[in-house]
Image: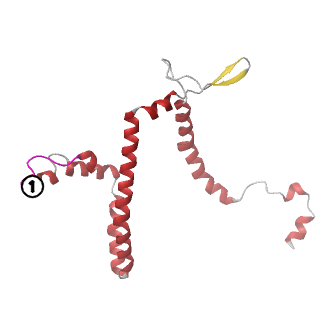
Amino acid sequence: RRGVDRMNLPKFLTRKVLPHPRWGVISIPYFWMLLFFAIPFLIVMKISFSSQAIAIPPYTPVLEYVDEGLMLKLNLGNYIELFTNSQYVEAYLSSLKIAAISTLLCLLIGYPMAYTIARMSPSMRNICLMLVVLPSWISFLIRIYAWIGILQDQGIVNSLLMAAGLTSAPRLDLDLAL
C-alpha cells in the first residue's frame, strides 16, 4: 500500500532529502579523522614537496599564481635526500628489522597463549584473560619509563647480573632492549 501512495506523488517529494540517521553517527568519526589525520597529512606532504626558504613559513609555496594561471612547483630534492642519505636508509632499515622481530615474537608468544586460554575452564579463562588485558590499561608512557628504570645501567636487571657475578659491567643495550 505504501508503494502505491508514493507512486502518485511527484518525484521531488519522494526523493530522500536527508541521508539515513545512521550517516549522522558515522560522519562524526570520519570528520574527526579528516580533521586530525588527513588535513595534517596533506600539510606535511605539501611541505615535503617545497623548498626551504628563510621566511615565514620556512618553505616555498607549491602552487603559485603566474600570468593568470596556476603553476605547480614540486621539489623532489627532499625525497632524493631521503633515499641517498645513508643515515635515513639505516634508520628505516632498523625500523623494519625491529618491526619484523616484534611481530615474530608477538606471534610466537601470542598464539600459544591464546590456544592455552581457549582450552581452559570458563572460570580460569576469565582470570587469565584479565591478566592478559590488564597491562594494556597501564599508560604507555609509564610502561616505557618502567622499562628504562629496569634496563638502564644501574637498573634492576644489570644490578642482579653484576651481583650474581655473571658480568663485571653493565651489558644490556637499552636501545635494543626497548
Q: Residues within 10 Å of mark 1 (few under 14, many from 20)?
A: few
Give the residue type at disc 1: Leu
Count all numbered tags in the image, as a single digit.
1
What residue appears at the point 35 percent right and 50 percent down from the top-left corner? 98
Magenta residues, dominant SS class? loop
Nearer-the-camera pick, 90 or 56: 90
**Which of the colour schemes (rainbow, by chain, secondary structure, one colour) is used?**
secondary structure
Q: Position of residue 97 (x, y in %)?
A: 37, 49
Q: For residue 161: magenta?
A: no
**Magenta segment:** 163-173
**Whole-percent x and y of residue 23?**
66, 56
Task: Determine the residue positioned at 16% across, 49% down.
Answer: 155
Secondary element type, mark 1: loop
Q: Position of residue 82 (x, y in %)?
A: 45, 33
Determine the image quadrant of residue 67. top right
Q: Quadrant of residue 63?
A: top right
Residue sitting nearer the eye, 91 or 33: 91
Left or right of residue 36: residue 1: right
Magenta span has 165?
A: yes
**Left or right: residue 108 compared with residue 168:** right
Q: Residue furthest bottom?
A: 121
State the quadrant of the N terminus. Answer: bottom right
Q: Residue furthest right?
A: 8
* Horizontal and vertical percent position of residue 172: 19, 49
Which of the pair 37/84 is nearer the observer? Answer: 84
Tell me the residue at 62%/56% (across/down). Answer: 26
Instruction: Say whether residue 35 is left or right of residue 71.
Output: left
**Circle 1 residue:** 166
The residue drawn where x is 52% and y is 35% is 44
